[in-house]
Amino acid sequence: MGKRSRWLWWMVVAVGVVGVVATGTKSGAGEGEGKGKVLEPLVTRIAFGSCANQSAPQPIWNAIIDFDPQVFIWLGDNVYGDTKRPFKLFGKERTIGPWKNAPRFIPSSPKELESRYQKAKSNPGYSRLRHTTQVIGTWDDHDYGLNDAGKEFGGKITNQKLLLDFLDEPQDSPRRNQEGVYTSYMFGPVGRQIKVILLDTRYHRDPLRSDGSVLGSSQWTWLEKELNGPKSAITIIGSSVQVISNLSATTRPLFSLESWGRFPKERDRLFKLIADTKREGVFFISGDVHFGEISRYDCATGYPLYDVTASGLTQAVEKAVPHVFSLIVRFVAWLTPTTMRVISTNCRFKSCTYGQPNFGAIEIDWSTTPVTLKLEVRDIVGYPVTGVKFPLVELQSRGSVPSVKAGEHRRHCSLEVNLPWMIKYRLAILFYCSVSALLLAMIGLAYAATLAFRLFLHKCKLD
């Protein structure tokens, strides 16, 4: 879509809304799909992203603008609103180690958070996108106010207003009067509609390791209503944290990542709700983890559930280490066991993860029979680094849900937590074996040096 066609697209919107420019019918906190008749333009391209540090360079907006999306979706960490303190093992305030007595992250004041939103909003690349594309979104922990925070965070009411101001949410929007920022939108004409459901995985989330609730009772009631609502050809569920992948099951005890897999009862409930409502054409998009990947789960709803993770626009694991260690990061990504990641020859790297700045791209070709769907993670210049392309009919129920027998392990069906322990913990085993070998080598070198020094002294005495 070039500049001319983009203007034609907006003209269609203006005519359809009869004087009011709009590209989606918004249902807010479950208020329905709208009562007025709206002639909606066909949506063929959607971009999404997460983890954008407002103080970092953001050249990736050029690639997103070149992709020419009609909708852009924020998936959280839209700014970094909390403050990260340095690693300190010793001293009065220790942020790491067994004697830790101070938090590594502390929340910013509302005034400081607002200034960070303003800085992000005034970024030249993002400003260009806002003027040509409808921007919607949800939040994650760092724009919610505090790293890994859930319902216990005290600043969430004030910070909700700041996020909605950043997203240019209308003052009369139901989102401004509800507990949480969850919402939904409907795009496109009847028969070719795309429903976007944005979840809030922070406001009501119970503490990690509790296996409690992620969404809270009110949001679950709303989500059930949304999934039981008018059908759409495609339903995109946006979650700030990963839904399908549960890498924490295979990276612990070295480190953990937030995901729905840390709340297995809630994730099972989500899958069951999609299956029970017989909603077809569903897939997930997510962020948070500072790398991109595509996951797939075949044993939940009668058709494959995809989760496209795009993270982040500025924050990425390979940028967090010196460049010379990038190959080590990629090796660790390849070595980490996963049963859900989509592995193909189309990936940039062998692990089919991408640890540099990236964004997500969705393309729908409505002109083909059957309709085709392309889901990709793209790099800073817009080239795909991993992706899948398939007919939309693949996301239609095939009847019975596949199951896995006890002791059987099937890719895209067996959960990471059920892997044999030798496979599940191979990353930790390799790490501890490497550390042990290094320590033994150091002890051996020290012993050899001591022995050589003694022989040298003995020889000096004889001389």
Image (tube, rainbow, N blue to C red):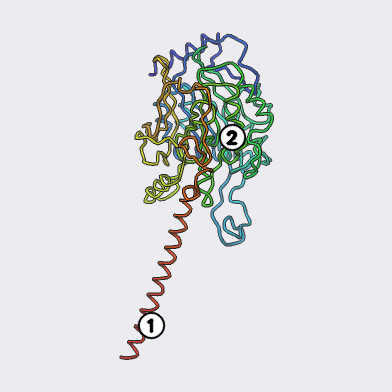
Residue 231 point in image, percent of width and height: 56, 16
The answer to whether the residue labelled 1 contacts the one labelled 2, judged by CB atoms less than 8 Å apart, is no
The residue at which mark 1 appears reads as: 454
**Which residue sits at x=45%, y=55%?**
431
**Which residue sits at x=58%, y=55%?**
95
Residue 328 point in image, percent of width and height: 39, 50
Q: Nearer the viewer, mark 1 or mark 2?
A: 2
Crowd around label 1: few <14 · some 14–19 · many ≥20 (10 Å): few
The outermost residue toward the left is: 463
Label 1, label 2: how many angstroms apart (C-alpha)?
A: 64 Å
Task: Decide which of tag 1 and tag 2 comes sooner along the chain.
Answer: 2
Residue 323 point in image, percent of width and height: 38, 49
Which structural element holds mark 2?
helix
Q: Amino acid at mark 1?
A: Arg
Residue 384: which quarter of the image? top left
Residue 320 point in image, percent of width and height: 45, 47
As drawn, 69 above or below 340: above
As drawn, 186 above or below 321: above
In the rendered image, the quadrant that contains the C terminus is: bottom left
**Which residue sits at x=40%, y=36%?**
343
The outermost residue toward the bottom is: 462
Between 205 and 272, the residue placed more toward the observer is: 272
As drawn, 328 above or below 411: below
Between 421 and 344, the residue placed more toward the observer is: 421
In the rendered image, the quadrant that contains the N terminus is: top left
325 relative position to 418: left or right: left
The residue at which mark 2 appears reads as: 267
Which structural element holds mark 1?
helix
